[in-house]
Amino acid sequence: MKFGGTSMAGTERIRRVANIVRAQAARGDEVAVVVSAMAGETDRLVNFCREANPLYDPAEYDVVVASGEQVTSGLLALTLQAMGCKARSWLGWQVPIRSDDAHAKARIEEIDAPALVASMQAGEIAVIPGFQGISPAGRVTTLGRGGSDTSAVAVAAALKADRCDIYTDVDGVYTTDPRIVAKARKLKNVTYEEMLELASVGSKVLQTRSVSLAMKEKVRVQVLSSFIEEGAPPADSLPGTMIVSDEEVEGTDMERQLITGIAADKNEAKITLTRVPDRPGAVANIFGPLADASINVDMIIQNIAKDKGETDVTFTVPKSDLLRTQTMLEERKEQIGFYRLISDDKVAKISVVGVGMRSHAGVASTMFKALADRGINVDAISTSEIKISVLIDEDETELAVRVLHTAYGLDAVETAA
Amino acid sequence: MKFGGTSMAGTERIRRVANIVRAQAARGDEVAVVVSAMAGETDRLVNFCREANPLYDPAEYDVVVASGEQVTSGLLALTLQAMGCKARSWLGWQVPIRSDDAHAKARIEEIDAPALVASMQAGEIAVIPGFQGISPAGRVTTLGRGGSDTSAVAVAAALKADRCDIYTDVDGVYTTDPRIVAKARKLKNVTYEEMLELASVGSKVLQTRSVSLAMKEKVRVQVLSSFIEEGAPPADSLPGTMIVSDEEVEGTDMERQLITGIAADKNEAKITLTRVPDRPGAVANIFGPLADASINVDMIIQNIAKDKGETDVTFTVPKSDLLRTQTMLEERKEQIGFYRLISDDKVAKISVVGVGMRSHAGVASTMFKALADRGINVDAISTSEIKISVLIDEDETELAVRVLHTAYGLDAVETAA
């Protein structure tokens, strides 16, 4: 079971978490709990580090910021004990959760679970701070922001857990953002790959790394809400969304929709370079320097070459990198040989995601037709095996999501009770 | 070097501490620094524990409260690095600082220093969180409130340090409280035993345990102020008070005063039981139950037996235990057989302390004469080898301290520059 910072923010909320954990343990399950720091605490600690040393040593940064989860793991153990449960905390170095030595963005390499397993078999609930590990040199490491989801999946894998329940402030994965489409439906299950695509296009329910790890280690992950009512049924009535393998979905869910979900991402900006010479190497001149600067270019379209061997090149970068990208390209204007740089940060990327796409034709044409019928102009298109994304005007985001949600038959149907 | 919570409270103050540390290291000294949590932080964490579980498991309490020093040790290392010093933090389990398993009040058993020494010899300043250790079972322990002084002395002993400099919010040990006596003088040195007696009578510059440990391990401890001016001379010009052995004092300080200091303690209350039967076992009936209840009885006077085999018994207990003591004694009134219980919490204990007392007669008579000359009534007396304490009316505390300070020749003499 994993609980995030909002769930751990203060004594009262920790008590709610402890109640959920106790209910699970009361069913006879062996339970390990991974916790985040109290909401806001990591930011406070990061700020101290920045004030102390703007170019901070990540090894010492880790010593400071890992303390937030240390506090909540001790407090949850204490709260469980107050309810009569046997419980103890296991810090990263105590488990141990072995990571590499890439401080502040470490990767878990191995979890030696025998002591932990023995304690759990003796009836103790294990409380483990997320986000932290120990390096080969025996120093404290952290996994990077949001790393607690990854800790939870890694611990579940090491324990060969039946399930990894990730409690969040949403109650599952939806067909789309319910704040945009009132008829959005909660999914009973979603595949790892779909979850990865949804995460990469702005549906940040889980950290991407944790989903990749779950896929690799075949950990069954359930996303569910920590804000359930006291006395609600325990988690194995599966009120959330299960993230599982393709096979499991295909085996159990014959009625599954072709498209699983629709996501909108407003964090991209569009850049067009006009009249770029249409010759070998021109494109490398544009994207090579951006790659060197770790600017993540997403969609790329090269328009049909016009007269005189010139072409327009359009692509997207994260909005936060737009200024830096513009500066770099203007500095290389002569070398690249473009005529004008046009940028637009009022764009949105709309994606339809679903493993069903692999075996069905016509998914893309449904999308283009639905958008065209409502007069929504598509600026760029990119596809993967289980995803189609289009770039549109930002003002049309909500309209596009609603139109596609209906077009793919995802709208919830009100049923008479 | 050890810095307390006031010195570590926030980025700016940590920068001041780092400046002091850097100046010391710049002299070519190998330096280890022991730090407390930011002022107020330990209270905040203790509060969380109490809220989570009023009868908290001390092992989990330790996990939570030890995080305060973890944060400041990382931040001091970062701040030193920002100034161009090589520095790293060493958590209790990393050194390791091995303690027993008496969680929340653990005692340090052994410090394995080779890795620490190697790092310091390689030019790294070691920053060590005070107050924490690791139990034989590999769990986090803390040493009890104020334990960082003890950590500092223990680390100094393990490193065979030339000196343990404890930076506080006073600039040394004085002949008496300078707020009471303007002519109080800062002592150049004081012996371990004197320091212990001064600590036990209310002069709380250092935690008593740390002084005992320093005496046992022969660590030279210097008390000095962390609020020195930027650019002030580094610590080995010895601006504070050195705490050293008897031999060292006798060898180096021929001009030493007979009496080292005068302390006042207003935390005691006086109880008199009248007309207690003067027979064997009567006193045991009084003090046995108090000892069982961990009530610390200090001064005891049994007045000269009166007619009919009865006697008055007077003693002191901490003010905080007065009510509890009264209740216990009234419950046993028949058994003990006293007539009346008279309590007085408006008393003060005045103590004169000095190793010179051992070899000089007349110290006590000077005290009694000086007090009598000013009409100050003495209610009770207790003595140790290097201390004489008297109990007086609380209203006369300041007067008594001033009178004795003068009587023993401790007043500072203004000298022309």
Image (cartoon, coloured by chain):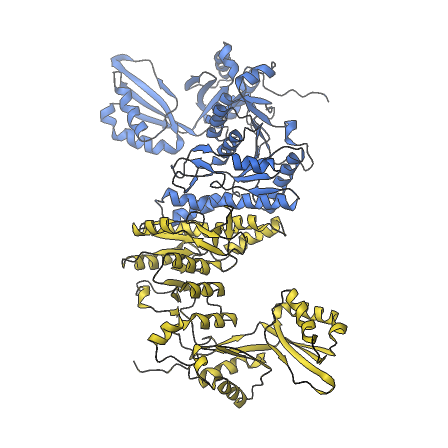
Chain colours: A blue, B yellow
Check the image and report above or below for A75 versus A344: below
Taking the spot 40% from the left edge, 63% from the top edge, the residue there is B167
For the residue pair A414 and A20, the one nearer the viewer reads as A20
Taking the spot 29% from the left edge, 31% from the top edge, the residue there is A328
Does residue A369 appear anywhere in the picture? no
The reply, left or right, for residue A224 in relation to residue A343 is right
Does residue B92 appear anywhere in the picture? yes
x, y percent for residue B153: 42, 60
x, y percent for residue A20: 63, 37
For the residue pair A195 and B407, the one nearer the viewer reads as B407
What quarter of the picture does the C terminus of chain B occupy? Answer: bottom left
Taking the spot 49% from the left edge, 32% from the top edge, the residue there is A150
For the residue pair A60 and B115, the one nearer the viewer reads as B115
The reply, left or right, for residue B337 in relation to residue B287 is right
The image quadrant of residue A415 is: top right
Residue found at the very far top of the displayed protein: A361
Check the image and report above or below for A127 versus B126: above
